[in-house]
Amino acid sequence: MIVMTTEAKYLKDYQTPDFFIPETELFFNLDDEHTLVRSKLQMKRNGEHTRGLVLDCQVKQVLRVLINGNQTDFNVEQEQLKIDVDLAEFELEIEVTVDPINNTALEGLYKSAGVFCTQCEAESFRRITPYLDRPDVLSVFTVTIFADAELYPHMLSNGNLIDSGLVTEDDDSNKQLRWVKWRDPHPKPSYLFALVAGDFDLLTDTFVTQSGRTVDLELFVDKGNLHLGHHAMASLVKSMAWDEQRYGLEYDLDKYMVVAVDFFNMGAMENKGLNVFNSKYVLADLNTATDIDYHGIEAVIGHEYFHNWTGNRVTCRDWFQLSLKEGLTVFRDQQFSADMGSEVIERISHANVMRTMQFAEDSGPMAHPIRPEKVIEMNNFYTVTVYDKGAEVIRMMHSLLGESGFRAGMDLYFKRHDGNAVTCDDFVSAMADANNKDLTQFQNWYSQAGTPSVVVSEKQTDTALELTLSQSLPTRPAAEQNKPLVIPVKYELLANSDGRSLERGTVIFDKTEQMFTFNCSEPVTLVLFENFSAPVKVQRTLTQEQLIHIVKYASDAFCRWDSMQSLWLQQINGASDTILDKSRQGLIEVIEYVLNNDDIETSIKAELLTIPSYTSIAETFDVINPSHILKVKAEITQQIIESLFETINALVQNLTNIEDGYIQSSVAQRRLKHILLTYLSHSKNSDVERLIRQVYLDSTNMTEKVSALESARVYSVALLDDLLKDMDTQFTDNVLVFDKMTSAVARIPHAEVYGKMALWAEHKLFSDKNPNRVRSLFGAFIMNNPEQFHDESGKGYQFLADFLKKMDKLNPQLASRMISPLLSWQRYEPARKDLMKQQLTQLSKLELSKDLYEKVSSALG
Ligand code: ARG
Ligand code: ZN
């Protein structure tokens, strides 16, 4: 029995490790319930102390411990293995067993769908073998795997395959076991260890690096799925070339392996030389994957590849520094995606992530700086704050230093720290030193939680525009006063007379309050935070006229999109009994203007026309009332469709015979068609039903099929059922398509959604042990069905709490991710606030995993 500790760890308590482990040798005898793991560790005392050895330990059973070949006493308690030893250097051998088949948490070594695989980040290597399981202990790993040769033809670990052979088991079975031996020459922390064993199809390719070395690329997929691996492989090749071109970074092993597995908690994992991927981010073809899937695969393949330098070669000193590798690597994958596709489309989508999920997290009970200071369960800190706000902070450094200054900083960072485990401060210092710049104040971004609010006021005289900005953060304990942040503000001045661009630039806003003067001799409209130049909430009152001026004339397409969104928000925030018909008419007119404007690029047009999501609207309210938001949003949509039905319908009819394939121009056209179809689906016109069926039937790609499903869901449940029935027979046994179907079901905005979800959870492809299945069905309900989840009866909240109760026992990490909508309970109007709190209170009375315990207790704290 392992006793769980719920004590918090603090950044301020960091201490260097008591021992180092220069060499790690591991032996695995793979078995479903009793895998035997033997380790042989070369231990080296760090410094002159006399403390005994304390290893992190969460294995099933410790069998024996040997020091320099002699069996020795040991003690396991509180997830630690303690050994009395006073030697300065010694060889430590440990034998343990683990139980992969019953490991539904999917951390450590687990077996699912016939495949053994590992997930060690952040602190799960200790579930495989006792170890100094912390990122500042780097070791050279040699790994030997023994397993049934027939069941597991592929037995993989990090680095290079250096030896292999056959042995006959010494029991009566006479079974042949095969063994393979891998060695990774690069010292690495335990979290980057990986092992995979299974029977796969193998797709291969090669990449010749800039220095002329040939790297073997190997992609392992489930049997029969080889044809689904080509896009992932092509993305890998592009990633490798891009990192050489943009950062001069070359791959450093002879082999790069990617394995796609069906059961995975996250997107993917950057284990050295052996990435393990959620199959969702590998498998794709035209018939089964949407444009969004194609994009996601390219981005995640890139992300994990880029970790080879930002994460693996230079890693984190401790887990509080997680953003050192994640913020930076997300920034790099964003740059990569922008270079492969469209910068502005990327920016819009990242701003959406920030303004919905990240701003919500930053205003809730789990708010933390991008470098957290206190952690109970590290898995809870793989957050939009650490990842996405972390990337925004890196991006602001890029804005301050420019492309070449940023590159100089990166070069210096690698020069100084290659092979080391370092801190966020080390990164900022490299950036500062390479550019001779003082970034001390900038570092406040690393230590202060909460979304900065920027209040804008402006005054125009005959000769100038005077802009006053003031910044504030949510209040902190009195002892820790917030300090002003360095905020790069990209701007443009537009002439009011004809929309001419008069001036563009960046001002650095780094005081609590600051005034900027722009000389201009004619009336102007100021465009602020071009390209989402800082992750802040802007409090600014613009008239509808000013917003429309920006939509029409701003150079920056991001701001044009942003102003369109604001036009919607104006209607919803300001809607009361006295809705101004005239201003509603103004919104409809600008939508019509965009619809009919052939000068607007298709991809941008689609974004300009996108109806703001419920979540992005909700996040702009201090007190959230879902009924109000949904009602007004539906009203506006209705009015738009009444006025513009013919125009929209005609445009959809024009968008036929779009060329299949993941080609930017086709992606844009399908996106626009989808947005237009969404508008139409709000009409009850029976032509629309015919149109949706036609889109579904005529399409030869999954993007349009899913688009039809989404529209059907809005139009009528009967139509949705019809399409789903067809899809279910056409795509039998395809789990990734099944996930798209269940996501549509889970978002049915009526009470019948509960019955439907229950029905689909009975489907033969559904399993509550598979995170993708669970997220697609229940996750979609929780996150993307505001109508039912936030129903005033409280039924949605109850549903989530009941679900979490069960899920926490199976997979705590997954449960913990899915509790997030309840955490913001204090943001809601009184009735819902109460209902949500009741569910949290119920949960708090149960015996919870560390993961859920940390969140529930902070939410009620
Ligand atoms: N490092 C991985 C990535 O960013 C994610 C690992 C997440 N692990 C976890 N336990 N939450 O790609
Ligand atoms: Zn990452």
Image (tube, rainbow, N blue to C red):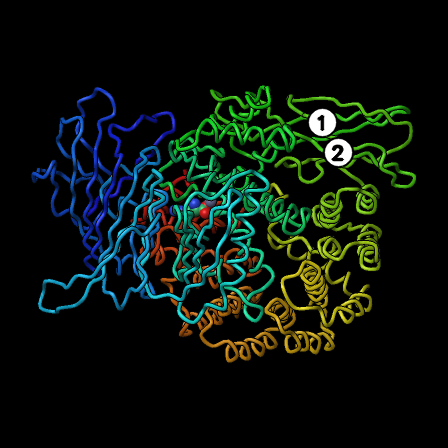
Q: Secondary structure at mark 1?
A: strand
Q: Nearer the viewer, residue 762 or 236?
A: 236
Residue 516 lies, in percent from the top left, at: 76, 23
Q: Is residue 613 left or right of residue 410?
A: right
Q: Quadrant of the C terminus?
A: top left
Q: CA distance from mark 1 to mark 2?
A: 8 Å
The amino acid type of the residue labelled 1 equals Val
Residue 451: give its label.
none
Of residues 16 and 105, which is closer to you in this image?
A: 16
Q: Which mark is residue 507?
A: 1
Asked whether 618 or 831 is in front, the reply is 618
Q: Percent position (x, y) of residue 463?
A: 89, 23
Residue at label 2? 491
Q: Is mark 1 within 8 Å of ligand 2?
A: no
**Label 1 packing within 10 angstroms: few (<14), some (14-19), many (20+):** few
**In x, y percent, where is residue 576?**
73, 49
Horizontal side of residue 630 vs 52, given as left or right = right
Quadrant for residue 294, please give it.
bottom right
Residue placed most toward the observer, 746 or 598? 598
Tell whether label 2 touches label 1 (CB within 8 Å): yes
Q: Vertically, is 473 above or below 354?
A: above
Secondary structure under tag 2 reads: strand
Residue under the image location 21 percent in, 33 percent down:
43
User: Residue at left 49%, top 69%?
Assistant: 227
Q: Residue at x 59, y 19 (%)?
A: 436
First reached walking from the N terminus: tag 1 or tag 2 = 2
